[in-house]
Image (tube, coloured by chain):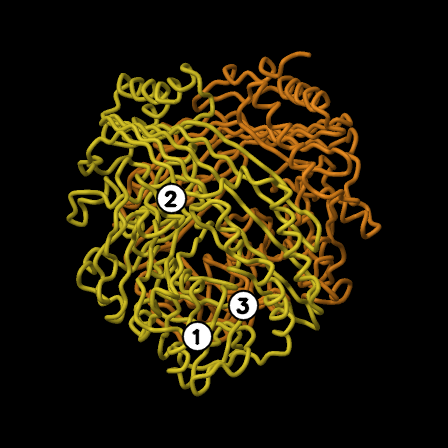
């Protein structure tokens, strides 16, 4: 692969590129699903190709091809330079890149059991058994399970001399039970909705989830939701379960801190951000107990945003985003770092595949653990609603106003969960919401959740991000708006 | 046996803006070679999908190009059937060893599961209605031509003290399907798209168009429209949330009603996750709502065959407010004792089918007439981040974006801060007062459709944001 990379960089340089970087990527994926006790999707795929980014005449060009011959790669590199020169016809300023060292390295994400080596029969047997456990429950009308495994090899080379090989193994799994009764559809998922939990782990992740034990629990909850009371509409105390809080972090902290959004580069599609440059180190983003980091290092955990180097050849880092409630940092790349006074990228350039341009992406954007024991948090809450497992999510294009609904809620009275609530939802303004946080559970309740489906960019790229979170409490939150009908 | 490595010679493909896709003859050779290889590997039946893409996208922001990309790729996806079991494997590596390994992976996946009594024999040779959706001039559009159009749009923004962001994309794609029962279905199309957001801080507005032929729209007219509306959108005032009469431009209609499409899948009803469960053949929407799925409509794009190679049929989904018909894959049709409609997804899958080419019946009004007829209401340019809140009542939430305007006494009087909505689509389609002509619309949340602008009463806005 290194010969192809060198060939690409040489061609780009000869054609006039002042900088170039290359990613050869080999992606392998396996998808398994079941529905109502029958196998649904059963597929495997691989994709191998090269993406070449060239800087010429002060502007960027990118071209990709799956034609991995010497001739094909050279033609692709020449096209990247040609496109860069076309870009220069409508450039507004010269690209300036923060300095970075050259690295020669090889890294593999740790895993105990290669999911591609586990027999398919074993994987399907587990899914079908979980499916059967859910179907046993009266009132369940649809059962679904899924597993997904990915193995990604990337060879990165740049004209400053980096040569970095990384291999990542990713696993994911989830189950869901749906109940249609009367004029209502209710659903419960485990361990999370929209595909379950995903992490930079091997098959050991699947084995740790205990699907068989949890399948009847969610199935019974799905059926029971029909007779539960409707979540009231009010302003009150809200406790969010870990996975829902992970998505709250993703939407209302992770996206607004992407510097490309802040700088208007996503204005036409994903949107911009309320976190204009003047807010850095000045905005009180959250209450003083809130600490958020963007941490791509393995030390943070096996998240979907964990790696050794980003797709610009910058080592993984931990960046303070919110420190004691104050806004402290953005996600940057080599091109944007200097705009916020940094002399180095924060290492967040990531690409979905060889045929996509790397762009600023969340790594693991996590809320650091607090001090509360979960039981103590519930016991301390006189009147509140606990919401768990996301059902819908939406936020405006500058990331101010959001609304989430969850699959299930629990009314808390006098420090006790007293009854199940259906159709729970809450909404708010990002900074008001985070400033209302008055309790965060401790490390024992903290989990690094995976969001495998974050869409951004044109052409669209899907990226996995990580979000560490433990249950937390928020005061004076608007509850029940999604089902209000004023 | 002729080795597929010769038939699938990637080196014969050109790279660059005028990249030539493989010819139909070359595609047929690949299909035949893979099918021979599958037969020799033990597959009882085999199906081959070949997808080839040569896409280009120029992206601009802050009045200049900041990203500019080209992509070329070819994938072969192989489904095998053996002993009542089926599975799929896909690769973009065309050497004979890789193709053989892909077939073996498909067979290995198939063998790993229990027998599936629902599997049907693959369909044989089919006849397809001809569609011509390939425009050479679009395929040949160069990075320089796109850059010049972008520069002109950015120059307009600079002249108007605004900031432009957007894309100008063009490209060509083909999708070919063949199987061991003699079915062969080739399709190719070109596409071009221009989308622009003009920002006049703190406001913005937006315009977008796409089609097979880049000459079907004028990037500079789109830029001018977005620029004018961005200027109008400045100095937005805040209104209280509540129920308003809204005039939804076609892009806003598209992105909302797009969330209905999967409910018309027969499999969704079988799974009891459709809002049409227990509601077929009874009045559900207003009498002025009629919807068909029609891939052959002149403003639609897409292949005239489905994921199994069956010809797509025009299906009347809603007739004057009454849901009349569903779409069926072959398996769903067999289970329901119906005729397949040519809307199935590639197998194996758990979703079955869906209409992908919705065409609404329009009316004789227009956005201008709707404004003129409105005492008090809101004109909505575009909606954003739409998600389903209630799957049976089809309550959707989302935000207005890039231009929300107050209409008073028949004219636009001011810009308004963006709202969040929580609105049932079923209720909305009962509250349509006026329809414009159905046009090809494109947004960001749903497939392109042929939809009209709509004037709707009692549209529910639940909260307001800060801009």
On the image, the x and y values in percent for residue B272 come to 70, 61
Which quadrant, please, contains the N terminus of chain B? top right
Q: Is residue B385 left or right of residue B51?
A: left
- Chain bearing tag 1 is B
Q: Residue at x 31, y 75 (%)?
A: A438
Among numbered discs 2 and 1, the one appearing first in the sequence: 2
Which SS class for mark 2? strand
> What residue does disc 1 label?
B241
Q: Colour of chain B?
A: orange
Q: Is residue A254 left or right of residue A329?
A: right
Tell me if residue A440 comes above or below residue A233 in the rendering.
above
- Marks 2 and 3 sit apart, C-alpha to C-alpha, by 36 Å
Which SS class for mark 1? loop
- For discs 2 and 3, the disc positioned in front in the rendered view: 3
Q: Nearer the viewer, residue B222 or A308?
A: A308
Which quadrant, please, contains the C terminus of chain B? bottom left
Q: Colour of chain A?
A: yellow
Residue B423: numbered disc: none
- Chain bearing tag 2 is B
> What residue does disc 3 label?
A407
* Disc 2 to disc 1: CB gap under 8 Å: no
């Amino acid at each position: 692969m290194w010969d192809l990379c060198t060939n690409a960089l040489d061609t780009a340089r000869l054609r006039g590129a002042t900088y170039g970087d290359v990613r050869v990527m080999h992606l392998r994926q396996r998808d398994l699903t079941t529905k109502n006790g029958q196998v649904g999707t059963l597929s495997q795929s691989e994709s191998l190709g090269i993406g070449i980014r060239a800087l010429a005449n002060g502007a960027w060009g990118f071209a990709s091809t799956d034609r991995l011959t010497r001739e094909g790669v050279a033609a692709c590199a020449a096209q990247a330079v040609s496109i860069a020169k076309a870009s220069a016809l409508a450039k507004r300023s010269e690209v300036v890149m923060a300095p970075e060292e050259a690295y020669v390295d090889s890294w593999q994400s740790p895993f105990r059991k290669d999911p591609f080596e586990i027999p398919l029969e074993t994987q399907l047997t587990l899914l079908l058994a979980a499916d059967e456990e859910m179907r046993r429950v009266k009132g369940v009308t649809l059962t679904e399970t899924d597993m997904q495994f990915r193995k990604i090899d990337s060879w990165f080379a740049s004209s400053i001399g980096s040569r970095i090989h990384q291999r990542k193994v990713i696993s994911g799994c989830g189950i869901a039970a749906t109940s249609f009764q009367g004029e209502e559809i209710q659903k419960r998922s485990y361990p999370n909705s929209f595909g379950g939990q995903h992490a930079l782990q091997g098959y050991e992740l699947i084995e740790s989830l205990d699907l068989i034990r949890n399948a009847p629990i969610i199935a019974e909850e799905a059926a029971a939701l029909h007779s539960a009371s409707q979540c009231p509409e009010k302003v009150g105390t809200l406790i969010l379960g870990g996975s829902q809080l992970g998505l709250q972090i993703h939407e209302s902290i992770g996206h607004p801190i992407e510097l490309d959004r802040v700088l208007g580069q996503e204005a036409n599609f994903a949107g911009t951000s309320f976190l204009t440059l003047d807010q850095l180190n000045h905005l009180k983003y959250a209450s003083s107990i809130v600490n958020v980091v963007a941490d791509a290092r393995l030390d943070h955990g096996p998240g979907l945003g964990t790696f050794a180097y980003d797709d610009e050849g910058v080592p993984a880092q931990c960046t303070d985003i919110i420190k004691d409630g104050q806004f402290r940092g953005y996600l940057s790349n080599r091109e944007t770092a200097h705009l916020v006074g940094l002399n180095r990228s924060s290492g967040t350039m990531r690409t979905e595949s060889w045929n996509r341009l790397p762009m600023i992406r969340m790594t693991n954007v996590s809320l650091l653990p607090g001090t509360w024991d979960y039981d103590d948090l519930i016991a301390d809450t006189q009147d509140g609603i606990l919401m768990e497992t996301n059902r819908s999510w939406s936020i405006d294009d500058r990331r101010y106003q959001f609304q989430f609904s969850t699959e299930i809620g629990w009314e808390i009275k006098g420090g006790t969960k007293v009854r199940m609530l259906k159709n729970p939802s809450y909404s708010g303004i990002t900074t008001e919401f985070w400033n209302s946080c008055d309790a965060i559970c401790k490390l024992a309740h903290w989990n690094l959740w995976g969001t495998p489906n974050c869409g951004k960019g044109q052409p669209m790229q899907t990226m996995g991000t990580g979000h560490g979170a433990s249950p937390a409490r928020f005061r004076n939150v608007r509850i029940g708006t999604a089902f209000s009908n004023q | 046996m002729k080795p597929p490595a010769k038939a699938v010679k990637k080196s014969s493909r050109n790279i660059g803006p005028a990249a030539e896709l493989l010819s139909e003859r070359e595609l047929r050779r690949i299909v035949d070679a893979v099918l021979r290889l599958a037969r020799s590997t033990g597959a009882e039946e085999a199906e081959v999908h070949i997808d080839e893409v040569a896409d280009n996208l120029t992206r601009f922001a802050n009045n200049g190009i900041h990203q500019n990309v080209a992509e070329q790729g070819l994938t072969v996806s192989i489904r095998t059937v053996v002993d009542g079991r089926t599975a799929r494997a896909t690769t973009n590596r065309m050497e004979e060893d890789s193709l053989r390994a892909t077939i073996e992976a498909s067979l290995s996946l198939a063998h790993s599961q229990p027998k599936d009594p629902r599997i049907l024999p693959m369909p044989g040779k089919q006849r397809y209605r001809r569609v011509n959706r390939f425009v050479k001039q679009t395929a040949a559009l160069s990075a320089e031509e796109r850059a010049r159009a972008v520069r002109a749009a950015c120059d307009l923004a600079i002249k108007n003290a605004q900031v432009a962001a957007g894309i100008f994309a063009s490209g060509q794609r083909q999708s070919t399907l063949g199987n061991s029962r003699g079915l062969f279905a080739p399709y190719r199309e070109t596409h071009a798209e221009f989308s622009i957001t003009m920002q006049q801080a703190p406001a913005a507005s937006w315009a977008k168009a796409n089609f097979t032929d880049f000459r079907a729209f004028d990037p500079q007219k789109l830029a001018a429209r977005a620029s004018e509306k961005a200027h109008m959108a400045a100095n937005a005032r805040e209104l209280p949330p509540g129920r308003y009469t809204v005039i939804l431009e076609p892009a806003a209609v598209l992105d909302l009603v797009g969330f209905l499409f999967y409910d018309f899948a027969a499999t969704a009803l079988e799974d009891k996750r459709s809002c049409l469960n227990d509601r077929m053949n009874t009045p559900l929407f207003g009498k002025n709502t009629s919807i068909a799925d029609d891939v052959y409509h002149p403003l639609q794009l897409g292949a005239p065959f489905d994921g199994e190679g069956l010809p797509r049929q025009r299906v009347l989904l809603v007739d004057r407010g009454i849901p009349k018909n569903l779409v069926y894959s072959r398996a769903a049709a067999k289970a329901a004792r119906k005729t397949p409609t040519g809307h199935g997804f590639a197998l194996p899958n758990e979703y079955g089918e869906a209409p992908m080419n919705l065409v609404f019946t329009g009316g004789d009004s227009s956005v201008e007439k709707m404004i003129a007829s409105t005492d008090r209401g809101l004109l909505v340019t575009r909606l954003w981040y739409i998600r389903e809140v209630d799957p049976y009542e089809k309550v959707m939430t989302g935000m207005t974006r890039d231009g929300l305007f107050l209409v008073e006494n028949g004219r636009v009087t001011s810009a308004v801060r963006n709202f969040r909505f929580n609105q049932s689509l079923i209720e909305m389609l009962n509250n349509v007062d006026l329809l414009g002509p159905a046009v090809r619309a494109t947004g960001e949340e749903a497939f392109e459709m042929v939809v009209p602008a709509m004037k709707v009463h009692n549209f529910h806005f639940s909260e307001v944001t800060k801009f």
